[in-house]
Image (spheres, helix red, strand yellow):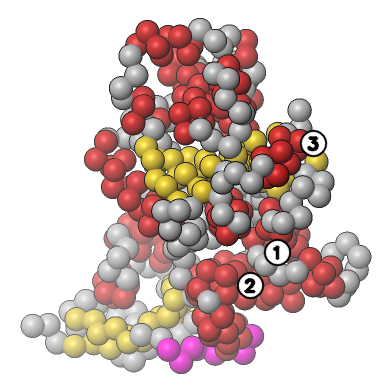
Amino acid sequence: MSEPTSNVFTDFPTLSRTAEHVFSVDDLRTKLASGKRLRIKYGVDVTAPFMHIGHAVNLWAMREMQQAGHKVVFLIGDFTTRIGDPTGKSATRPVIPLKQIERDAEAFVRQVSRLLITDPEVFEVRRNSEWWDKRPLPEFLGLLAQVTHAKLIQRDMFQQRIKRGDEIYIHEMLYPLLQGYDSEALDSDITIVGSDQLFNELMGRFYQERFGSDPQVVITTKITPGIDGREKQSKSLGNYIALDDTPRDMYGKAMSLPDHLVRQFLEVYTLVSLDEIVELDRATTADEMNPMVGKKVLARALVKRYHGPEAATEEQEWFEQVFSRRSVPDDIPTVAVPADALRLLDVLRACMPEKSLSELRRLIEHGGVKLDGKTKLTDPAQQDAVPEGAVVRVGKRRWFRVTFHASA
């Protein structure tokens, strides 16, 4: 049964801000009082080497517990990735090749290591293929025999598919059992997850109880909408602030946040004190904070948390220069473009070689390219669109000074 977090996190201020429910509070109190080094399960399927600040909510909470001496077991779901968790999915996930899984797993470890303490005393990396690849079929069938169809079909995304008349494949129904048993295999004491993973992790408690183990405590954390104010942060929707974002992109994305989400983002994603957030609230009314003031505090706090105080100061000054005073930044790069690259598309390709031609074409056609920050350039094939020494602005935060040179 779910209970409010109450005062159970007095020693963990980050969790006290971001936790929603604990299953169960009494179990957590008992574990924390035992003096034992607790094992904190953190499992991910490696569907893409990408993490955003929504993922980081749980990582910061785990780091806080590491600092108290507890151990994070980072579980790479290299086996379960081949199946795919149907959470939030309206269709079956495509099969991901094993080589891609291994490559993406390394990227996940790199990103996680930016936030977690990687000392082996408090950090361990495991893969669930360790036990699933070797498990005999009779034993696996024995695990299945402990769970009824009625229990599994309660999962909300299965109910949604049934209502729509969509198919549910058997391997998808088995996913919660696989993720749940991972907790037994790892001897997990605690897992910190978003509420969308609650069903799977309660299966972990179920299996641990069946095997006579001490069941893990499941802590669910707050999930916010993305920076577009709609669905939760997702790479496919482009509504995220990524851990790998540059300080400039991180600051700019925070400033683009809808006004009504500023307080929520401050509370969940920053270390700004709750007292200061309340004071920001009072800047206008008791219910609505001054959006621009709050956004600047949010943007600076995010950059400081992930890139340090110097970067936060630099980005605040840059933003003030470019947007508040509407001037061209001083530190824009100069790009030398071949003189025979006369089309606008060719000029932009020289400025942003990491982008595909189709991406650049869309940027131009959708009005994302301006000459000297003012005149929109919308025709990719336009000749001589950019004169010598002119400044091209791409989107809101990228600028280039263009010069031309003779081709070799």
67 or 150, which is in the foreground? 67
> What residue sits right under mark 3 in the picture?
3
Q: Quadrant for residue 317, please give it.
A: bottom right
The stretch drawn in magenta includes residue 325: yes
Up/down of 181 relative to 258, above or below: above
Count neighbours of disc 2 (C-alpha within 10 A) and say few if under 14, some if 14 to 19, many if 20 or more. Answer: many
Up/down of 131 relative to 58, above or below: above
Count neighbours of disc 3 (C-alpha within 10 A) and say few if under 14, some if 14 to 19, many if 20 or more. Answer: few
Up/down of 121 relative to 335, above or below: above
- What secondary structure is found at the residue carrying circle 3? strand
Which image quarter holds the C terminus? bottom left
Residue 246 visible somewhere in the drawing? yes
> What residue sits right under mark 2 in the picture?
301
User: Is residue 61 found left or right of 243 in the rendered image?
Assistant: right
**Kind of residue indicated by mark 3:** Glu
Furthest residue in direction front, as rendered = 35
Up/down of 135 relative to 367, above or below: above
In x, y percent, where is residue 118?
43, 57
Disc 2 or 1, which lies upstream in sequence? 1
User: Is residue 263 found left or right of 233 in the rendered image?
Assistant: right
